[in-house]
Amino acid sequence: MRRFERIVVLTGAGISAESGVDTFRDKDGIWSKIDYRDVATPQGFERNPGLVHDFYNQRRRGMAGVEPNAAHFALAELEREFHAHFLLVTQNIDDLHERAGSRQLIHMHGELAKALCMNCGSRHEWRDDLSTSVPCPACHHTGLMRPDVVWFGEFPYQMDEIEAALGTCDLFVSIGTSGNVYPAAGFVEEARSAGAYTVELNLEPSGGRNLFAEAIHGRATEIVPAFAKQLLGSG
Ligand code: BV8
């Protein structure tokens, strides 16, 4: 494998699947059980904040006992070797990447373990249930705390940093994502037009498979450590 200097990795729900975290669009996935318009849009929160809080409270509670898997650890090791020019962008809102040791990390869709006050804009570490009766720890306003996640129709976080990295990378790797959600699904084309080599690692071909120069299919806990080892072996 050729030698790369500047790597951008994008991950989706598939990298956490073997840790026991549900994906969205697989059979029995999250969106097969609840309509995303009711729980992952600002309009849904406006209509029924209690339903949205229950949805995220269940997912927050569901993280108890969930551990990072070999794929998360392999990416953290890859970063340590490529520290200066390595960026991990995740669509996931779980904290498994940071718990595996990843540091050059952007949660473009926000974080389950954070709450945002819509009154004063303050953000808070949040591992308990949220509800409309929880006061903001900063402004003490009640009723306007929400999960700090990016819903459909909202702007993903740190897009400037992400676009800058895509424009200068020489390797773009997409792991465990179905390529359904934009702008993340369009990152491969931005990286490719900047001259990067593009690889998809996924259980099965994603919707965007043909946009990648190479695709490796299999379970993340097997193909990600093997891919990272090959990259490190190429020096
Ligand atoms: C925005 C909330 C304006 C948090 C989520 C074109 C350009 C820009 C926007 C749009 C556009 N077209 C349409 C839009 C609007 C919309 C959109 O994309 N709609 C889709 C449905 C068409 N996008 C937005 O609204 C975004 N904001 O556009 O702002 C803008 C415009 C331009 C530039 C900047 C901004 C906001 C999108 C964020 C929505 N929030 N969730 C939460 O509750 O988690 S989306 C939701 O889907 C999650 O965040 C999730 O991360 C994301 C993507 O899903 P995946 O991670 O891919 O999961 P999925 O289940 O689909 O796939 C899992 C894959 O893993 C599968 O392929 C499977 O095979 C694989 N797998 C399974 N097991 C394994 C495995 N692989 C390996 N090993 C295994 N063991």
Image (cartoon, rainbow, N blue to C red):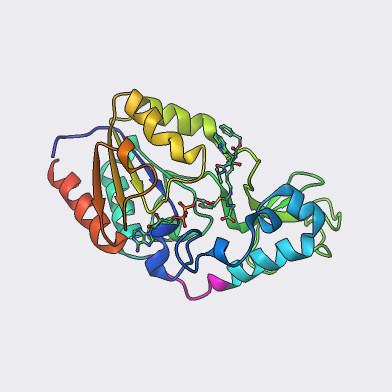
Does the magenta segment cover residue 201?
no
Q: Answer with the quarter of the image where residue 130 lies.
A: bottom right
Q: Residue 5 placed where, x, y %?
A: 25, 32
Residue at 80% x, 63% y is 134
Taking the image as shown, residue 230 lies to the left or right of residue 187, namely left
Q: Residue at x 78, y 60 (%)?
A: 49
Relative to 187, 6 lies left or right: left
Depth check, front residue: 24 or 130: 24
Q: Looking at the picture, how far across and down is residue 171, in whole percent?
A: 28, 35
Q: Is residue 23 visible?
A: yes
Placement of the C terminus among the 4 image quadrants:
top left
Picture quadrant of residue 18? bottom left
Q: Is residue 159 above or below residue 17?
A: above
Residue at the limit of the structure toward the bottom, as seen here: 65
Q: Is residue 130 visible?
A: no
| Residue 67 horizontal side relative to residue 153, left or right | left
Most frequent secondary structure within the magenta stretch: loop
Task: Check the image and report above or below for 108 versus 85.
Answer: below
Q: Is residue 64 magenta?
A: yes
Q: Between 65 and 227, which is closer to the camera in this rendering?
A: 227
Q: How many marks?
A: 0
Q: Position of residue 106 (x, y in %)?
A: 48, 44
Quarter holding the N terminus is top left
Magenta span of residues = 62-68
Identify the residue at horizontal 65%, vertical 64% (top origin).
Answer: 56
Residue 84 vs residue 152: left or right? left
Placement of 192 over or under 107, stated as above or below:
above
Expressed as whole percent of the image width and height from the top left, the position of residue 155 reads: 62, 38
